[in-house]
Amino acid sequence: MNIVIIGASFAGVSAAMELRSRDKQATITLLEKQPTLGYMPGSLHLYWEKKIDHLDTIRFITPKKLDQHAIHCQLGATVLALDTAGKKVTYSLLGKEEQIDYDKVIIAAGSRQLSEKIKGSENERVLKYKQYEEAQKAIDIVDRSQHITIIGGGHVGVEAADLLNRQQKQVTLIESMDYILFKYLDSDMTRPVQQKMLAEGIDLRLKQTVSAIDTALEEHLVLHLGEDTLKTEAAVMGVNVRPYLPFLDASIRLNSDQTIAVDQYLRTSVEDVFAAGDCIQLTGPEEDSRYLPLINNAVRSGMTAARNLISPVSPFKGSLKTIGTCVFGYYIASTGMTEADSLFTPRQVNSHRQTVQLNSLPDSDTVTLKWVYDAQTHELLGAQMVSTSNILEKINTLALAIQTRQTLDEIQQTDYFFHPSYSQLTSTTSLMPWNTEESEKNET
Ligand SMILES: Cc1cc2nc3c(=O)[nH]c(=O)nc-3n(C[C@H](O)[C@H](O)[C@H](O)COP(=O)(O)OP(=O)(O)OC[C@H]3O[C@@H](n4cnc5c(N)ncnc54)[C@H](O)[C@@H]3O)c2cc1C
């Protein structure tokens, strides 16, 4: 069996490793246009945070490891065409066109940060740093700039605002919604983070949208925000990434957002062609199809595509858009549906917010939790956490509870450890209304 995988990042590499663990004989070829392998897109933030000295420090996979698993990875190979009728992939390598035949192909070509909607975003002072070479250029431009504007208040944008602020840069953050991190948190949960951002001197501009970027000035950009303009030395693209798939032939059906349409086994509309990672939509927390570009989704969908290559045995379970990060001194985590998301579902949804102590000691820190659940069945649908202590791992317990469709009553019965130094009398990840420092009940 000859398997070709287009793109050797999280989805492509996970697919290749899973395939190899299931089939020792298959010929597995990864085609990757970048000259290097295994770059972690968040590495620039780790570098700015001084957690790593070089962008190169973390590589999630190396050519040596792939070799050990007898997976051939051709770096510097840009796929130009996928001919699904002839079962051939054409790619360029060192200026020459090459072809490779396949029995099965997995498209794992991911996404890029370039916005087709914002004219001028291709300029090099508009920083995009998902790839290694882009991140290297970004370091240089940031070092030479004092005022930096971040376009988009998602987790990448808010992290960048925090880290650039810590480098004494003057930071403006522009977000078109009326609060930051809206995909993952409700506005009441983001309030302390926003207040801290303002206290730290971030020029936070909500309900404003960048429509175009004028790049005519040397060493400066002019951002157009409706009638207003903003002069800045550099900008960071923190808006949603998008797939870029010019090599597809017309037989592969696309969704309206230009992602590849797949079924639950990650099969495309053409036989023997699969897709995974940032180039597809996934079933989201509201059980509709959504674009949720996250590494865990890329890894899990890559592995799932590999499992279904021979026959459809393992449906993809979808995504709860689980995230965790630390910004402006607050650890924030979220999984599943937010209260704002619930407006788009036919379900009747309730929410409850509570603040609980993290351990039994008198100086214990607290975590504020928001529970989103079905009003009739009490099935947990979503959870959010904000704390000045590192509570991030706890969100995985709640993600599992949502994935296994547990009710609040069942979650209360979950077994847990108790130790006064590390926990409370009841588990933080069980909703006990009586175990609350302060509580608010928000009915929707
Ligand atoms: C700054 C930043 C930080 C992020 N941090 C996080 C985080 O902390 N946690 C998280 O969950 N998510 C994070 N993300 C999102 C994450 O990067 C993506 O979800 C993830 O990279 C998707 O993996 P993928 O394998 O599907 O695609 P990609 O990582 O986009 O990889 C696709 C690969 O295909 C290759 N390719 C594309 N076209 C071709 C072609 N024609 N020929 C050959 N090769 C091709 C590309 O070079 C690339 O290597 C971050 C994103 C950004 C921008």
Image: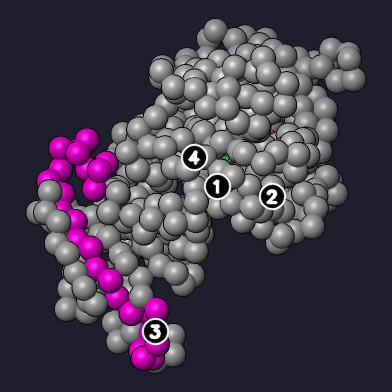
Pick the residue in front: 443 or 220. Answer: 220
- In the picture of the structure, the residue carrying the numbered disc 4 is 173
Q: Does the residue labelled 2 lie within 8 Å of ligand 1?
A: no
- Evaluate if marks 4 and 3 touch, with contact meaning CB atoms under 8 Å apart: no
- Evaluate if marks 3 and 1 touch, with contact meaning CB atoms under 8 Å apart: no
For disc 2, the neighbor class at 10 Å (few under 14, some 14 to 19, many from 20) is many
- In the picture of the structure, the residue carrying the numbered disc 1 is 161
Q: What residue type is labelled 2?
A: Ser
In the rendered view, would you say 280 is above or below 165? above
Image quarter for ligand 1 equals top right
Q: Can residue 220 be seen in this view?
A: yes
Residue at the (47%, 15%) spot, across then down? 253
In space, the residues marked 1 and 2 are separated at their CA atoms by 15 Å
Residue 380's tag is none
Q: Nearer the viewer, mark 3 or mark 1?
A: 1
- In the picture of the structure, the residue carrying the numbered disc 3 is 364
Q: Position of residue 238 (x, y in %)?
A: 54, 36
Helix, strand or loop status at disc 1? helix
- Evaluate if marks 1 and 4 touch, with contact meaning CB atoms under 8 Å apart: yes
205 horizontally vs 83: left or right: left
Q: Nearer the viewer, mark 1 or mark 2?
A: 1
